[in-house]
Amino acid sequence: MITVAEALDALFALARPTGTETVPLAQAAGRVLAEPVIASRNQPPFAASAMDGYALKGVEAEPDAMFKVIGTSAAGARFEGNVGPGQAVRIFTGAPVPVGADRVIIQEDVSRDGNLITLGRDLDRGPYVRPAGMDFAIGDRVEAPRVLGPRDLALIAAMNAGDVTVARRPDVALIATGDELVMPGEEPGPDQIIASNSFGLKAMLEAAGAQVRLLPIARDNEDSLRTVFDLADGADLVVTIGGASVGDHDLVGPVAAELGMEQSFYKVAMRPGKPLMAGRLGPAAMVGLPGNPVSSLVCGHIFLVPMVRAMLGLGPAPAPRRRAVLGEDLPENGPREHYMRAVLDESGVRPLPRQDSALLTILQRANALLVRPMGDPARKAGDLVDIVEL
Ligand SMILES: Nc1nc2c(c(=O)[nH]1)N[C@H]1C(S)=C(S)[C@@H](COP(=O)(O)OP(=O)(O)OC[C@H]3O[C@@H](n4cnc5c(N)ncnc54)[C@H](O)[C@@H]3O)O[C@H]1N2
Ligand code: MOO
């Protein structure tokens, strides 16, 4: 059996970049920027007023000084003339500061009588002028790769990019397998249960940036598996769920092999998730997840999300870990890296009492995986341990 780190390296070797496409900015939220955006303009493009008030020469801004108002500069309609000595221009926030002026006096500090203004005694310091290019200048960049969020999109829009080059979303085909499964909402027979894993995995992988297809459930026979594998055609990543272990009905490995899957590994020293398999199936990467609900979702977090991120060009990095204070004593760990379903709060991290990999209620209550290294000795409350936040 290989280690989790070795399995992850093998999976990164299977994950190929998906290439790029151009999308309108309004559809770019959550996408991975693949090429830098370079500003083609300065912002602001002119010296702009930061306040509503009067633009004038700063050296003349003395208490009680008087000025003649010679025009108006509004956002979108500048004053074309020059501001000379003793002159002021009525100005509004965002408007171009006219030539000759270098300070804006806020209107609260001014009294006006017809076309004459008098400054107050106690003037705000100002100057309330934003120089051209103060926010960004031509040639400034938003670097790639990065996941585009609201703040990126606002900045890119201000740089005047109408569309952006992003990584194509990896096409992930999810195949649930098993005679015992029916879809949620259907009427299960007496020996049947509801296919749940695909729904958790779909949400998880879409949040990571993939486009996920839920294929029909494959039954526990070779024909059915072959038919559903056919439907995965065109996928960048084919993920099967279940049928990965050693039972008589665990046919995913043999059928995939018959379809030409070049196996990269089978079985990882981890708990849950031991019967994980992976390989290359034509142009696609293939990952066979164990069927137990917690195993498949934990493997999704630890392996599939990092794979999708690597395909998107975000680099080969494991699921982020951090240190947390252990909230209770733990016995020594066995020979497999253990991802314990745990609750993290201000007082520390504690594993939930039942760790059977069939228990979705426990996984749903957990907000972290407490990671026990292989052969980790007993730990005391107060020790620092690794966690992966869920
Ligand atoms: N003799 C051995 N038996 C088992 C071993 C082993 O090493 N030797 N490993 C155990 C471990 S660990 C795991 S994990 C499971 C994995 O088995 P499979 O990947 O073959 O999964 P299945 O047998 O198909 O299903 C296991 C379990 O999960 C349920 N299931 C499957 N798919 C779904 C789905 N899409 N949604 C909800 N639930 C699903 C299925 O009904 C079974 O209850 O093998 C152990 N056995
Ligand atoms: O490895 Mo299995 O995934 O322990 O339940």
Image (spheres, grey):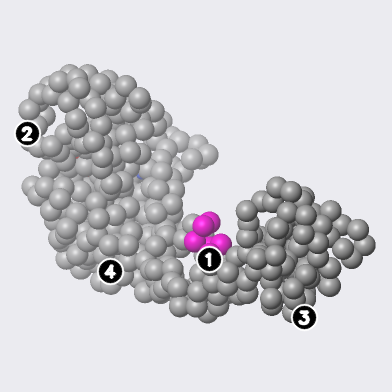
Against 202, is 255 above or below? below
* Disc 3 target residue: 81
Determine contact: label 3, label 1, CB under 8 Å.
no
Which amino acid type corresponds to the residue marked 3 in the rendered image? Gly
Q: Tag 1 or tag 2, which sits nearer the N-term?
A: 1
* Viewer-nearest of discs 4 and 1: 1
At horizontal 25% and vertical 31% (from top left) the residue drawn is: 324
Q: Tag 1 or tag 4, which sits nearer the N-term?
A: 4
Classify 10 Å Cα crowding around label 2: few (below 14), some (14-19), many (20 and above). few
Q: Tag 3 or tag 2, which sits nearer the N-term?
A: 3
SS for callout 1: loop
SS for callout 2: loop
Q: Tag 3 or tag 4, which sits nearer the N-term?
A: 4
Tell me which segment is drawn in magenta. Answer: 150-156
Determine contact: label 2, label 1, CB under 8 Å.
no
Q: Position of residue 213 (x, y in %)?
A: 44, 58
Q: Nearer the viewer, residue 49 or 176?
A: 49
* Viewer-nearest of discs 3 and 1: 3
At horizontal 76% and vertical 62% (from top left) the residue drawn is: 54
Which amino acid type corresponds to the residue marked 2 in the rendered image? Gly
Residue 135, numbered circle: 1
Q: Position of residue 253 (x, y in %)?
A: 20, 55
Marks 4/1: CA–CA distance: 37 Å
Which amino acid type corresponds to the residue marked 1 in the rendered image? Asp
Classify 10 Å Cα crowding around label 4: few (below 14), some (14-19), many (20 and above). many
Q: Tag 1 or tag 3, which sits nearer the N-term?
A: 3
* Viewer-nearest of discs 2 and 1: 1
